[in-house]
Amino acid sequence: MSSKFADRIARVQPSAIRDLLRYGDDPSITSFGGGYPDPALFPTAELQQVYADIFAKESATALQYTASAGLPGLRAQIAKRMANGGTPTDAEDVLVLQGAQQGLDLVAKLLIDPGDVIVTENPTFLGALIAFNPYQPEYAAVDIDEDGMDVDALEATLRSNGGVKFIYVIPDFQNPTGVTLSLERRQRIIELANEFDVLVLEDSPYRDLRFEGEQLPTLRSLDTEDRVIHLGSFSKILAPGVRMGWVSAEPAILEKLGLLKLAADTQSSTLNMTAVTRFLEGFDIDEHIARARVVYRQKRDLMVTTMNDAFPAEVAVTRPEGGLFTWVRFPEGFESAAFMVEHALPEARVAYVPGGTFFPTEERSNYARFSYSGQSDEAMVDALSRLGEILQTEM
Ligand SMILES: Cc1ncc(COP(=O)(O)O)c(C=O)c1O
């Protein structure tokens, strides 16, 4: 049957980490693998009330088809939140999506011809590679350090690869590393995009989860030539299960993305769009986010401190200023995937995401992503201490 598949499907392959992540379902394993928000933070009671009210008062419209671009009231609320956050945006500049993930797919469909070069951070979000791959791009991966993408390396990459289509960047608390792109580098990326005539895809689902330091401007707000396509999401600040995200971009891009969305799924769920709109009208989402920030800061502190205490000194751990992840660098030559299968899982009963698959061009084996969002304090400390002991013996 596979001989009937289109050529592009050759690039649609299960990732190696899927096999490893299934250990996360084993209750005897403490998993730091999934990038899931803490379910204790879901505003369950509020959403229950919102959905009940919708069914009582407006089910005829909420269960009906609606405009493909999204409910006007929701687009307006998203625009207001973006404008309040320093990115001037009108409701017409917003297209509602099924999560930011849909934006990655639709932007890829809009922009990538087979063989086009896409610049990504190195490492980058695996879900983006999964979305881009079927459109058959080539990747140029630019290393990142504690201030995000190395902009000198980016310049060299843009110079040596004529006609790069777009630069994909996760500026705030990047997945997988947790690092944040500095202001100077944000500005430089915009300058380089202008100079080399490329677009920028800014993916920022963790933006509101900053628990330390100052909020930095979006690339979209620094954009001087309307080159930035901005993706946002309610997944990490409300609940991923409502599948609500958005894209904001200049009108010609947004119009085409809207047509592609129409083809993909007609529209996002009217019911869930209504619920998110009513939630934003009736409750203070910023107060809710403030609570989440307190919880995640505490969890970040506990994870980083426990790792620094328990892991061998040559293991380096990032200290993110927001988001859900820390990134662990083991010494050169360490195989984090093999170590997980041979030691972390059977001996420490701990799972993490081996870092290799986050590198688009050349796998690097000595990294791992740990999420601090999903475990209780006690389980986190116990599991990391067990892992630390085994690392101390095995390294
Ligand atoms: C960097 C990044 N982009 C996009 C997404 C997709 O998020 P959504 O749930 O909004 O589709 C995620 C989810 O983990 C992510 O980490």
Image (tube, rainbow, N blue to C red):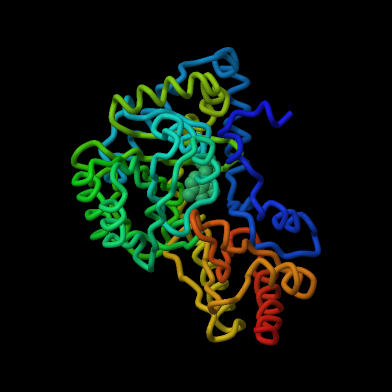
Instruction: Work out which quarter of the rendered image holds the C terminus and state it.
Output: bottom right
Residue 361, x across and y down, in percent: 49, 55
Q: Tell me which residue sits at (37%, 45%) in the image.
A: 202
In the image, residue 70 above or below residue 221: above
Where 4 sits versus 35, above or below? above
Residue 174 is situated, as x and y percent measured from the top left of the image, at 44, 57
Q: Is residue 27 shown left or right of residue 318?
A: right
Q: Choose between 344 and 278: the one closer to the eye.
A: 344
Q: Quadrant of residue 186?
A: bottom left
Most extreme residue toward the front is 3
241 vs 156, nearest the viewer: 156
Residue 21 point in image, percent of width and height: 70, 55
333 to 9, vertically: above or below: below
Q: Is residue 54 left or right of residue 25?
A: left
Vertical placement of residue 256 versus 367, above or below: above
In the shown orientation, is residue 32 left or right of residue 236?
A: right
Report if residue 101 is visible in the image: yes
Name which residue lies at 33% across and 35% down: 80
Left or right: where 216 falls relative to 70: left
Q: Looking at the image, which residue is at 70% across and 87% down?
A: 393
- Residue 339 percent coordinates (x, y): 69, 72
When asked about the image quadrant of residue 302, the answer is: bottom right
Question: Which residue is at 30% across, 24% downward?
Answer: 252
Q: Is residue 236 visible?
A: no
Task: Using the image as rendered, state which of residue 25 and residue 51 is in the foreground.
Answer: 25
